[in-house]
Amino acid sequence: MWFVGLVGGALSALLACGPGMDEGRETRVESLAQPATSAVVPLFDANTPLEPAMVEERADAIVTRFSDRVRDRHAREGSFQSYEHYLPLYFEYRTISVELIDYVARGGNKITVNITSLWKLDKRDFRAFYRGEHAESAEYVININMEEVGPNKYTATVDYNPRKADRKLAIGDPMEIEISRFFDPISPPAGRSNYYGTVFLYVVGKGGLVPWEGKNFEFQGPNGKITYVRDSSPLRAEAWLGGRTTLSYNYSNEPVHQFKQMSTNLAPMNAQPFVEGRRLHHTDFGDGTHSEAGNPVFTQHQNQLGPLFVARSCVGCHINNGRALPPGESASKLTVRFFVNNAAWADLHYSINGGGQQSFRMTHDNANNNSHVVKDIPGGATVKYHFTIAEGTGLKVTPEDQFIAGGGGTGGAGGYGYSVLAPPLSYTINVGQVNGTTVSPHPQLGRALQSQSISGDSPEGTVRISSWTMTAGTFSDGTAYQLRQPNYAFSGPVPTNYSARIAPPLVGVGLLEAIAESTIAGMEDPNDANGDGISGRMQVVADAQTGQPRMGRFGWKAGQARVSQQIANALNLDMGVLTTIYRAPDCGGTPCASAGIELSDAELDKLERYVSLLGVPARRNLDDAQVQQGERLFSIMGCSTCHVPTLTTSPHHPKAELRGQTIRPYTDLLLHDMGGGLADNLPEAGASGAEWRTPPLWGIGLTASVSGGEAYLHDGRARSLTEAILWHGGEANTAKEKFRTAASAERNAIIEFLRSL
């Protein structure tokens, strides 16, 4: 969704319609002339209203407030693989607010923990001080059924440390907690009633939660040495890539879910908006279904798709919230919908890879349309098909047609054909007309090629990767490598100016929004005054709602200023869903649907909170000698000049989770000329075809685990981190050459460092 837009470069809104526009189509024309950086208006300043702080310093205590969602199993139970995923109905009454009052921090002797549930609880197990003696243990020394103190309010008090001889709580003591909830059996809400909770680590006297790793803890018991396996230990600060949003290490053997988690420090006020935003993120805006089994149809959001679109849902492109892979034959299995419109009945006949023909009577609906879904078609397979269609009192047999099964394809004519439902087209083709210093929408395609339509038979056109151009090269030690560049084939109008973008990972975007403009401006050197060959400059865009000049942050060319505007832009271009920010569809030369509002501001806010508050995975392998060598070489070779390791977010961001955080994103958010090899021919705002925003690197080492494969750079051409580095040119050419000419051991060290992020 948003971030195929976010990567989609479909972010070229300089002259966007304002809140008062309610009819017709939007005509967004962007100028390539850049306002001065000094004209940029900050998103947030000292007058910005702030959401409540999560750590409160009182005279008698330090109070930490946070939230939690329900879990299926415990954090260390790798054999179950059931801790990180989301259970059915996760968005209904299944979050809690937690208040931890630390009196020890002010000389007292106890810690009180209060929770507020959205539904009456029967059992509410509060557990503290882990005592597991095997790798998958879920045992605790303290187990308390929290006392009910009001409607849906419960409390527990800890006044000793069972691990210490004197049993006194003291500043600096790590205290692991887990809170399990069981709904009232007399009147439970729909769905399951018993749940476990997240494992949190609190350090007494410090305030705030900390991400943790599992380390063995040994001590002398009455009958000999005792070892607590994977005892929670605070992660070192350099592992906190996302500040206090950083997630703890995962021990439940669920790598695919690592980009889906709540930030560790999620505020109570944001727990329910987060899960409700996630529901929207997983909703098909055509039929309202949820992408995960066991969840009800979201009827409020049926029939909001299109009429033209790229994907049916946000997760259609942002699978697992990770980096997308290029479409095409890399897909192992596909789901294809065949359709015949405006017919009393129709039969489908098809074969796969020359096999026997199969025939099915298609499902007929109240709109007089027919469809049949075929699953598990091998990626790259040749599919031949035709239809027998009722026509008046007779029959019509269509000519046999064929296609190569690949992600996101659509084909057919005259009211019949096919559409690939899964995997969807997880990238966008942004299009436009370049005329001197302006870029205007393509007269037939608008600002993005939309390869699907709600009727199934009239998309704007399709695109596929028809081949790869291979370029051979060698490292200085003689080792050969090959780089590949995609070639695209279009059906329908063929745009002269276009840019293909795959969906990027979503984690950390809220923190990027929270970085002060002055911080980024301080890293600018547009004229290379220091002579280091690097001339990064700030992208300046017009705010899609106010028209004010803002710093561009999001997208491969930094074309949008705010997370909410990026999401609204992607809803508009990628799904045809309208908001108050973008009220008119992108329809090129086709008849345009009416402007309006389909997703309310309140719902857009939930989506924005979900995306902004995803937790950032922690850095790994900090003590590995090869990783440490790679980190040093990353700096020595000049990579860190643009991929700046450490930044601090502004104290003025409204969300408490995001403000005042020391983060390690490895980006400067500036535009850099990356050379002709990576250039496209569609400028965006003030960015030329060769200029790209420095992408953050946090989470990049988890790409294969989350996405099921590897693909890097804006169009996914790089099949490995090594290839991604070798594509660097322009301002990055010197650093690239240092990598290319380095010894094999040094190159491997840099790659291992990147994999630790």
Image (cartoon, rainbow, N blue to C red):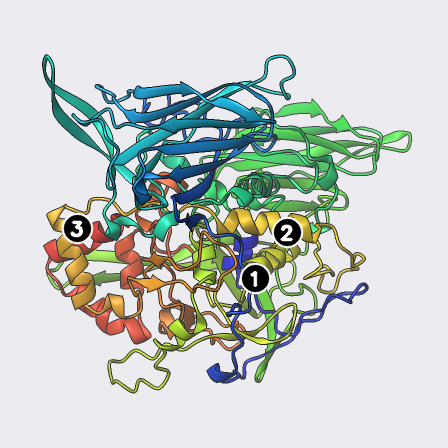
Disc 2 and disc 1: Cα gap in Å?
Answer: 19 Å
At a point 35% along the width and 74% down the height, the residue shown is 675
Q: Secondary structure at mark 1?
A: loop
Which circle's residue, 2 or 3, is located before the other in the chain? 2
Is residue 505 visible from the viewing direction of this image? yes
Q: What numbered label is drawn on residue 604? A: 2
Q: Quadrant of residue 107?
A: top left
Q: Nearer the viewer, residue 291 or 614?
A: 614
Q: Please provide percent x and percent y for residue 98.
A: 47, 36
Q: Please provide percent x and percent y for residue 185.
A: 59, 13
Contact flag, marks 1 and 3 (Cβ < 8 Å) = no
Q: Is residue 443 left or right of residue 495?
A: right
> What amino acid type should be assigned to the residue bearing mark 3?
Val
At a point 67% along the width and 24% down the height, the residue shown is 359
Disc 2 and disc 3: Cα gap in Å?
Answer: 40 Å
Q: Secondary structure at mark 3?
A: helix
At a point 65% along the width and 58% down the height, the residue shown is 492
Q: Quadrant of residue 165?
A: top left
Q: Nearer the viewer, residue 727 or 71?
A: 71
Which circle's residue, 1 or 3, is located before the other in the chain? 1
Look at mark 1 in the image and give the residue it sits on.
49
Look at mark 3 in the image and give the residue it sits on.
627
Is residue 426 visible from the viewing direction of this image? no
Q: Nearer the viewer, residue 545 or 370?
A: 545
Q: Secondary structure at mark 2?
A: helix
Q: Please provide percent x and percent y for residue 485.
A: 39, 60
Which circle's residue, 2 or 1, is located before the other in the chain? 1
> What amino acid type should be assigned to the residue bearing mark 2?
Leu
